[in-house]
Image (spheres, rainbow, N blue to C red):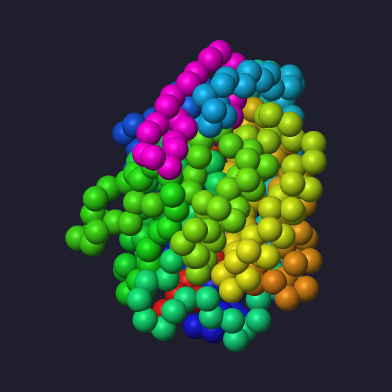
């Protein structure tokens, strides 16, 4: 398949059925949790009443205590734009006082959507050997709630289509030893509790120490509760840094999955991302948008912050749709 044809238009229907067939994870995390990891492989947990971050606390181990707004805020998710597929009317999320209860309904046919397709002749992956994929972000990238997170199912999907990929990154390795009889690459660059600015502090080093062919960026969840104002500006700066430091890589940036306790902030932030990606793609950057928000149900959030196994599998399908056309 030519990279100029968005793979999001090809596999959405098949994955929608696939995701619904995956059982919920047996291990669900309830309440605010934290897990920070360091390059030396150590991990530290922290907690605290009222903590509401992706991972619960900054990587330093301090506890960030936040309170969600009161009153059932609602908002509408955005679909893809610019050279890709747009979904239906999106997903509406409501959060009760204190973020204790929530519900999400999706009217679109499933998650997915994209925009800003790069030059049709662009090929980031090598002709031989594995395509190096960098999972970059916070605890959702780390895989809090399901060991290995979305990376497990993403690796399986690539294997099923005879694509050779591996994961890069310097953080604490996690995930299964094997997937479908093949050694699973347990690397990643996800640190619990980190904001966009903190993630940017790892670019170019150590995140790009081993230069990836593809970067998967999901960032901003912690900003929504630690300070949502200016999150779009910080994300734009991070994208520019990645483009400058990894000019030959495909940068895949997503909006963030639902966070019921900060629904309004998430909707406002997510709405800025497709145009942000489109602008950079139009300027010649190798960057595409992946819609991780639309159609994501709260039933697939194990602790109302992090996905459970089914949620991570859903994320894997969206990532795979975005990159499949570039894999060899």
* The one of 52 and 114 positioned closer to us in this rendering: 52
Is residue 36 inside the magenta stretch?
yes
What is the quadrant of residue 291 in the picture? Answer: bottom right
Please give left or right for residue 120 compared with residue 240 in the image: left
Res 295 seen here: no
Residue 248 vs 120, above or below: the answer is above
Pick the quarter of the image with the C terminus. Answer: bottom left
Residue 12 vs 221, above or below: the answer is below
Res 170 seen here: yes
Residue 235 % position (x, y): 71, 50
State the residue at coordinates (40%, 31%).
43
Task: Name the main secondary structure of what is drawn in magenta.
Answer: loop
Residue 63 vs 280, above or below: the answer is above
Please give left or right for residue 154 compared with residue 140 in the image: left
Residue 276 % position (x, y): 76, 59
Outermost residue, bottom direction? 121
State the residue at coordinates (68%, 19%).
67
Residue 211 % position (x, y): 50, 65
What is the quadrant of residue 131 in the picture? Answer: bottom left
Residue stretch in magenta: 35-54
What is the quadrant of residue 143 in the picture? Answer: top left
Is residue 204 inside the magenta stretch?
no
State the residue at coordinates (54%, 84%).
2
Outermost residue, top direction? 49
Residue 56 % position (x, y): 54, 27
State the residue at coordinates (32%, 46%).
175
* The one of 182 and 99 positioned closer to us in this rendering: 182
């Amino acid at each position: 398949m030519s990279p100029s044809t968005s793979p999001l238009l090809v596999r959405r229907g098949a994955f929608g059925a696939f995701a619904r067939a995956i059982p919920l994870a047996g291990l669900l995390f309830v309440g605010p949790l934290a897990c920070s990891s360091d390059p030396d492989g150590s991990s530290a947990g922290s907690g605290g009443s009222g903590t509401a971050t992706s991972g619960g606390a900054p990587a330093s181990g301090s506890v960030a205590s936040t309170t969600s707004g009161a009153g059932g805020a609602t908002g509408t998710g955005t679909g893809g734009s610019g050279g890709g597929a747009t979904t239906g009317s999106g997903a509406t999320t409501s959060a009760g006082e204190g973020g204790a209860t929530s519900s999400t309904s999706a009217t679109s046919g499933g998650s997915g959507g994209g925009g800003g397709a790069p030059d049709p002749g662009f090929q980031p992956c090598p002709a031989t050997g594995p395509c190096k994929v960098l999972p970059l972000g916070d605890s959702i990238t780390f895989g809090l709630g399901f060991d290995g997170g979305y990376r497990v199912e993403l690796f399986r999907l690539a294997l099923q289509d005879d694509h050779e990929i591996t994961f890069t990154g310097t953080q604490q390795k996690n995930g299964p030893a094997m997937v479908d009889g093949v050694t699973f690459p347990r690397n990643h660059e996800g640190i619990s509790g980190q904001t966009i600015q903190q993630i940017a502090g790892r670019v170019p080093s150590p995140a790009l120490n081993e230069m990836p062919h593809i970067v998967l960026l999901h960032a901003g969840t912690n900003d929504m509760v630690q300070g949502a104002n200016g999150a779009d500006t910080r994300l734009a700066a991070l994208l520019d840094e990645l483009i400058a430091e990894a000019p030959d890589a495909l940068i895949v940036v997503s909006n963030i999955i639902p966070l019921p306790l900060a629904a309004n902030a998430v909707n406002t932030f997510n709405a800025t991302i497709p145009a942000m990606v489109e602008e950079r793609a139009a300027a010649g950057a190798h960057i595409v948008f992946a819609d991780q928000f639309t159609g994501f149900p709260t039933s697939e959030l194990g602790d109302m912050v992090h996905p459970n196994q089914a949620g991570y599998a859903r994320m894997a399908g969206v990532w795979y749709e975005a990159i499949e056309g570039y894999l060899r």
